[in-house]
Amino acid sequence: MARSAFQTLNLSRGFTFTEMLLVLAVAMAVTGVGYAAATSKALQFTEPIPFQDQLKLDIQAVQMHAVVHGEYSKIVFLSDGTYVASGAGSAVLFSRRLPKGVYLSEFSTLKQVEFTKLGSARAFGTLHFHTPEGDIRVIVHIGKGRVTIVR
């Protein structure tokens, strides 16, 4: 007796939907645990951001705050080894301590970096930092708010 195509399909059973979901759940769990372990290990070996890169990011953040909020904003370098960012209409945006061995030189022509509500620098000059790796100069250009960091 010949079998029809429909009867042949019924005899060659595949996986049920529940079995497929179970296999998929196990595969996702194994992948998730592996990814979490790899990410955790990678984060342990990340080095802190170098001072000049962090300073550049902080200056850009204050300039962006000035433009977005339309207010005068500044970063002031204090004699106790910290710098504080603030806006005209807001409280302190952030405060950071200079890394160990880094200090602002007395030869600096600026003690703060100021931005108008358009993001332009209010004053030009140079911040001169002494670091264990060598001197770093932050040059603030008048006008468009360009800041250059030179090693």
Image (cartoon, rainbow, N blue to C red):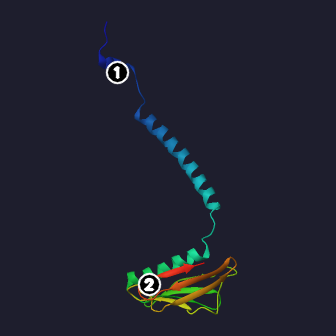
Q: Quadrant of the C terminus?
A: bottom right
Between 23 and 46, which is closer to the camera in this rendering? 46
Which amino acid lies under the numbered mark 1 shown in the image of this protein?
Answer: Leu
Label 2's element?
A: loop
Estimate how packed mark 2 is, as few (under 14), some (14 to 19) or many (20 or more) residues with alpha carbons within 10 Å: many
Give the mark nearer the N terminus: 2 vs 1: 1
Separation (CA) of disc 2 from disc 1: 73 Å
Q: Which mark is residue 145?
A: 2
Position of residue 124 in the picture relative to residue 17 (left or right) = right
| Residue 89 placement: quadrant | bottom left
Between 112 and 108, which is closer to the camera in this rendering? 108
Question: Is residue 91 visible in this depiction of the protein?
Answer: no
Label 1's element?
A: helix
Q: Quadrant of the N terminus?
A: top left
Is the residue 148 above or below the residue 126 in the image? above
Question: Is residue 131 visible in this depiction of the protein?
Answer: yes
Which amino acid lies under the numbered mark 2 shown in the image of this protein?
Answer: Gly
The residue identified by callout 1 is 9
Q: Position of residue 141 (x, y in %)?
A: 47, 86
Q: Residue at x 61, y 86 (%)?
A: 128
Q: Position of residue 25 (x, y in %)?
A: 49, 42
Estimate how packed mark 1 is, as few (under 14), some (14 to 19) or many (20 or more) residues with alpha carbons within 10 Å: few
Q: In this rendering, which labeled residue sits more in front, label 2 or label 1? A: 2
Q: Which mark is residue 94?
A: none
Is the residue 23 above or below the residue 42 in the image? above
Residue lying farthest to the top in this orientation: 1
Q: Residue at x 39, y 82 (%)?
A: 67
- Asked if the residues shown at circle 2 and circle 1 are in contact, with their CB atoms under 8 angstroms apart, the answer is no
| Residue 130 placement: quadrant | bottom right
